[in-house]
Amino acid sequence: MWGLTTFTYPWAFGLPGYPTKDSLTLEDLLERAARFGAQVVQIAHNTPLHLLEERTIKRLRELAREKELVLEIGTLGTRRDHLEMYLAIAEMLDARLLRTILDEPHYSPSLEEAKREIRSVLPLFAEKNIYLVLENYERKKKEDLHHLFTEIDHPYFRFCFDTANSLGAFEDPHEVLKLLAPYTINVHLKDVVAFRPPYQLGFVIEGRPLGQGSLGVQWVFDTLCGQKEVTYLIELLTPWQGSMEKSITTEAEWAQESVRFLKEVMSHEKGK
């Protein structure tokens, strides 16, 4: 299955320091996903679900059912009480998984702390038939993540692979996925380019629509060809375009281009 996330349109949802007067709503996102023919939508931590009223959450569930969309949700951190709260939200939304990362905004647990918290809550996730999914990001190396998966070794503890995040940890994304492929159930597809700034010192890594950067996606499908139940989600790192209006417009155009590209790739994959 493939789909969109709230990080397909981060400018439209609003970023810290870059508020927008007419933010995209979660209902809007579901409508766009349905128009594109997507099968899944992931609501991530840039639109915190625990701040919504229960009636709003139930309305999202009904809209997803109406549009025949599978929902996934995301948050930050591994504290048991927080994960339990989001498990309840996931159940309310009929979500198939909860995606998180180890660090919260002002707290970074040790691997042992994270392991203890994750182990304690996994029986609850298994009982509800909802996966707890951990994503790679720039502050953790692939060996740290692999250690958690091998030590915890639970069928409801799985990996979310982001194609670009490990670049921030100076790791080759291909090697990250190769190591963690057996645990992968969720993929954030991003594409980027690297170039020198005008003053020629160092490099800038900048987002592009899928298929128009240096990462590509075919290697992801080749690596995960034997994995079942994987969802492939488009996320964008659209650079600032000089104004909120232009940034939101460019982001929407890139989303359309990325959808067209991904649908072509997945159609080819089905034909193999």
Image (cartoon, rainbow, N blue to C red):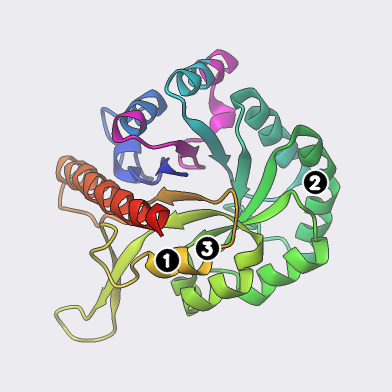
Q: Residue 122: which numbered mark, if any?
A: 2
**Which circle's residue, 1 or 2, is located before the other in the chain?**
2
Tell me the element at label 2. helix
* Amino acid type, mark 1: Ala
- Point out residue 27 in the picture as x, y percentages from the top left corner: 39, 23
**Which circle's residue, 2 or 3, is located before the other in the chain?**
2
Q: Is residue 166 left or right of residue 181?
A: left
Image quarter of residue 49: top right
Q: CA distance from mark 2 to mark 3?
A: 27 Å
- The residue labelled by disc 3 is 225
Q: At x 47% / y 44%, what residue is drawn?
A: 1
Q: At x 81% / y 66%, what residue is drawn?
A: 151
- The reply to whether callout 1 and callout 3 are in contact (CB within 8 Å) is no
Image quarter of residue 91: top right
* Amino acid type, mark 2: Leu
Q: CA distance from mark 1 to mark 2?
A: 28 Å
Q: At x 67% / y 55%, what residue is drawn?
A: 158
For the magenta stretch, what is the residue range?
34-58
Q: Is residue 255 left or right of residue 1?
A: left
**Which circle's residue, 1 or 3, is located before the other in the chain?**
1
Q: Residue 164: which numbered mark, if any?
A: 1
Packing grade of label 1 (10 A; few <14, some 14-19, many >=20) is many
